Image: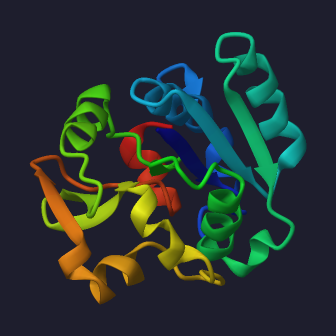
Amino acid sequence: MTGLILAAGASSRLGEAKQLLVYQGQSLLERSIRLAFSVCQEVVVCLGAEVKQTVSIIEKLQKEFPALSYVEIENWEKGMGESLSVGLKTIDSANDVLVLLCDLPFLTNAHMKNIISLANPERAIVASFQGVNSPPVLIPSALRPLFKNWSGDQGLGKFWRLNPMLCEIIHFSDKFRDVDVPEDREYWGI
């Protein structure tokens, strides 16, 4: 299984690159990489904005995680769908892929293990936090062709709305609170 971390955005609503924000002593990007490696054998990070600083974080972590790599998304400004599409194309088509975002401070290793425990070769496993569906999403290799032409600002929400029969929702009691606006930064003490 390969982890795919989407960390290419400029975080325009927040006003600064969220992947570089420090939470509990580590950047949100580093935290996401560590979470991904808690259940994945390899991890690919999609980069766009702030490439120089994010590559620096990745290069330091490659000493600990040699199976960590990154891909620069040429048209990252188009949105999450662009990163998802390009990122998936860099991963062996036979691999299941666990898609994560780097701005979810509430995620834990337990969430990752619960999602992986439900792995199904025919259905995507979608996390739901108090009714808010969100990555992490486990995409089995059989469903990856559905993302071949994904582009623009199409996040994963479009996928589970259009294909509910191909998704299994795993419900968590945790409240969904990402880091998108300055108030979120205050909430998390970042």
Name of the residue lying farthest toward the top: 64
- Position of 107 with respect to 164 (left or right) is right
Q: Nearer the viewer, residue 183 or 7?
A: 7
Name of the residue lying farthest toward the bottom: 162
Picture residue at 25% right of the left edge, 43% below the top: 115
Tell me residue 125's x, y (percent). Answer: 26, 57
Q: Nearer the viewer, residue 140 or 86?
A: 140
Tell me residue 59's x, y (percent). Answer: 81, 24
Q: How is the image coloured?
A: rainbow
Q: Nearer the viewer, residue 42 or 61?
A: 42
- Position of 76 with respect to 174 (left or right) is right
Picture residue at 59% right of the left edge, 82% below the top: 153
Please indicate, yes or no, whether residue 63 appears anywhere in the rendered image.
Answer: yes
- Position of 87 with respect to 60 (left or right) is left
Please indicate, yes or no, whether residue 21 appears anywhere in the rendered image.
Answer: no
Tell me residue 183's x, y (percent). Answer: 44, 58
The image shows a total of numbered marks equal to 0
Tell me where residue 33 sits by quadrant. top right
Picture residue at 73% right of the left edge, 80% below the top: 78
Picture residue at 57% right of the left edge, 48% below the top: 5
Residue 167 lies, with reference to residue 78, above or below; the image says above
Residue 146 lies, with reference to residue 41, above or below; the image says below
Tell me residue 106's x, y (percent). Answer: 32, 40
Tell me where residue 39 sits by quadrant. top left
